[in-house]
Image: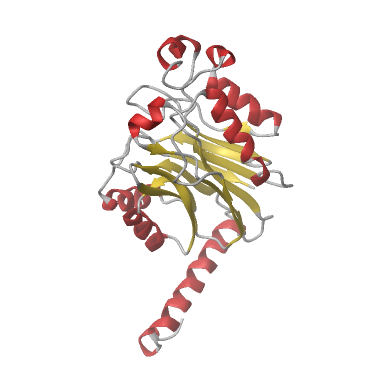
Amino acid sequence: MGNYAALPSKSRAWRVQIAQRAALETLLTGPEKKPLRVLSWNVFNENPDAARIADALTALNPDIALFQEVLPAHIAVIKASFPYVSVARDYALKGELCHLVIASRFPTRRETILFHSDTSKPAPTRWARHAGWVEFLDSLSVDVVVPGARPFRVVNLHTSAGVSPSARQAELAETQSHFDCEGPCLVAGDFNSYAVPWLAPLLAIPLHYRPKDWLIFERRALNSWFQRQGFAPAVHGVTFPKFRLQMDQLFTRDITVETAVIERRLWGSDHRPLSLEINL
């Protein structure tokens, strides 16, 4: 490999990056081809310890990672772990902005950010106003270029918590152009799919329910909506342990899921990380 000490620092970094990419290509296209590791995780914008994010990345070792509620300090840690990082706005909490991030060990292209709203918009419900939320600002997608495979689309979403289930369904419809594409696609994120009929008497007034909202089993409706688009849900179980809810999910199309795990450890978040091993 040569004497790195004799090279300028930029040249050394370039040679190291080439060597890392060659090693990944060998893993993915050689006789012992290994699946891709994918992580989706709401890291929690009240998690001040970026070192916990670094610990999680070391332990889970994803090839591709999708994050929600990412603070600037978190972004710095993510960029130290991945050569390709795309960032968009997520939501604002009492004026502080957090972000959506897609990070990859493989080259990415066709980064697309859909603008949905501005931080100056008024909060739409009593609950959102009380919490200080301005939600669903952007959605984000990229195409990941994996050696020996077709490029595949990766989409990162975070729909609003402080609205009715029908409002979240309308938000989801706004993002559909991300995955109106041919070929393999993975959609992941925090969908806040917590609405069920027996909670409607509690939620109807603060979240401005319409009559149809009273009967929605939201997680079931979310899975059905994606299935009509040709996607399959990857995990089943509690992802938000504080209230024993599944609010996070990964949906795949034309992708083989080898393993799907809801991690038990939180690493300072209020959401559990979701890990997949996939083949394209």
Q: Position of residue 188 (x, y in %)?
A: 53, 40
Residue placed furthest toward the right: 182
Q: Position of residue 207 (x, y in %)?
A: 45, 22
Q: Is residue 163 visible?
A: yes
Q: Is residue 101 visible?
A: no
Q: Residue at x 43, y 34 (%)?
A: 123
For residue 31, above or below residue 22: above
Residue placed most toward the observer, 180 or 152? 180
Residue placed most toward the observer, 200 or 210? 210
Q: Residue at x 57, y 44 (%)?
A: 278
Q: Quadrant of residue 253?
A: top right
Q: Residue at x 46, y 50 (%)?
A: 89
Q: Residue at x 61, y 41 (%)?
A: 175
Residue placed most toward the observer, 278 or 40? 40
Q: Position of residue 91 (x, y in %)?
A: 43, 43
* Applied colour scheme: secondary structure
Q: Position of residue 146 (x, y in %)?
A: 61, 58
For residue 46, above or below residue 232: below
Q: How many marks?
A: 0
